[in-house]
Image (cartoon, rainbow, N blue to C red):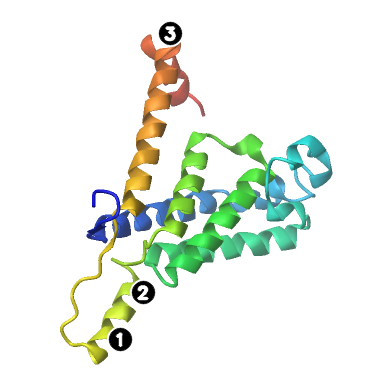
């Protein structure tokens, strides 16, 4: 029951809103540089990516190189992340968001840091979870439909394993990042924090 039971969907709904909003904000910050970062007219063309890297990554942007096509996928990413945030067609929006976030990040991995990786991982978990069960347009529409059929409908619950996977992944991330930071003097003596806050 601890893993296969049911639980309140509201925490996962709030988490979905947070992740979706962070994806929108993150990619809106890149808006002026999308062609420079991700198109063949930018800093790194598709031809410049070594073949050995292509075997271990996936990106829809490997198949399109023009700035117009890249911006079209960019707009689709922003729309799907917005729909994920408000919880409209949540499963589809989460899957499309994950594939497009993965595509943009893998097209030019030189821009990435660990926060980008976490956003991608969490987008995947939202795609496999029932993250639209609470605080979403989908839940409102379902309640309206259910009230017409069954006036006294109980609150919908979600499987416990879905949020547990996200909690487990988060704890693994914190454990290994803490372990890595404890291995050298940079974090212990404050040098790493100094470099981080002084990076223009």
Is 125 positioned to the left or the right of 137 in the image?
Answer: right
Q: Nearer the viewer, residue 135 or 44?
A: 135
Q: Are marks 3 and 1 in contact (CB under 8 Å)?
A: no
- What residue do we see at 78% from left, 58% from top? 66
Mark 1 surroundings within 10 Å by alpha-carbon count, few (fewer than 14), some (14 through 19), many (20 or more):
few
Residue topped by disc 2: 138
Which of label 3 and label 2 is nearer to you?
2
Mark 2 surroundings within 10 Å by alpha-carbon count, few (fewer than 14), some (14 through 19), many (20 or more):
some
In the rendered image, the residue lying farthest to the right is 47
Q: CA distance from mark 3 to mark 1?
A: 59 Å
In the rendered image, the residue lying farthest to the left is 152
Q: Secondary structure at mark 3?
A: helix
Q: Are marks 3 and 2 in contact (CB under 8 Å)?
A: no
Residue topped by disc 1: 145
Q: Nearer the viewer, residue 200 or 125?
A: 125
- What residue do we see at 48% from left, 61% from top? 94
Residue 105 appears in view: yes
Q: CA distance from mark 1 to mark 2?
A: 11 Å
- What residue do we see at 39% from left, 14% from top? 182
Q: Nearer the viewer, residue 97 or 32?
A: 97
x, y (%) of residue 10? 25, 60
The dot on residue 166 is: none
Q: Secondary structure at mark 2?
A: helix
x, y (%) of residue 26? 49, 49
First in sequence, mark 3 or 1: give its number: 1
The dot on residue 185 is: 3
Mark 3 surroundings within 10 Å by alpha-carbon count, few (fewer than 14), some (14 through 19), many (20 or more):
few
The quadrant holding residue 148 is bottom left
Q: Secondary structure at mark 1?
A: helix
User: From the viewer's perspective, is residue 91 above or below residue 124?
Assistant: below
x, y (%) of residue 95? 52, 61
């Amino acid at each position: 029951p601890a893993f296969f039971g049911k639980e309140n969907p509201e925490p996962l709904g709030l988490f979905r809103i947070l992740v979706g909003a962070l994806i929108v904000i993150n990619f809106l910050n890149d808006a002026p540089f999308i062609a420079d970062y991700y198109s063949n007219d930018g800093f790194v063309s598709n031809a410049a990516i070594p073949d050995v890297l292509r075997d271990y990554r996936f990106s829809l942007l490997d198949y399109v190189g023009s700035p117009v096509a890249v911006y079209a996928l960019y707009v689709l990413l922003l729309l799907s992340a917005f729909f994920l945030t408000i919880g409209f067609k949540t499963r589809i929006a989460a899957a499309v968001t994950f594939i497009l976030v993965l595509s943009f990040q893998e097209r030019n991995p030189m821009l990435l840091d660990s926060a980008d990786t976490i956003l991608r991982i969490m987008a995947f978990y939202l795609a496999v979870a029932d993250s639209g069960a609470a605080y979403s347009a989908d839940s409102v529409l379902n309640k309206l439909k259910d009230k017409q059929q069954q006036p006294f409908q109980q609150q919908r619950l979600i499987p416990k394993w879905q949020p547990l996977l996200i909690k487990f992944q988060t704890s693994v991330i914190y454990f290994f990042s803490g372990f890595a930071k404890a291995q050298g003097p940079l974090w212990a003596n404050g040098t790493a924090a100094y470099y981080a806050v002084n990076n223009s």
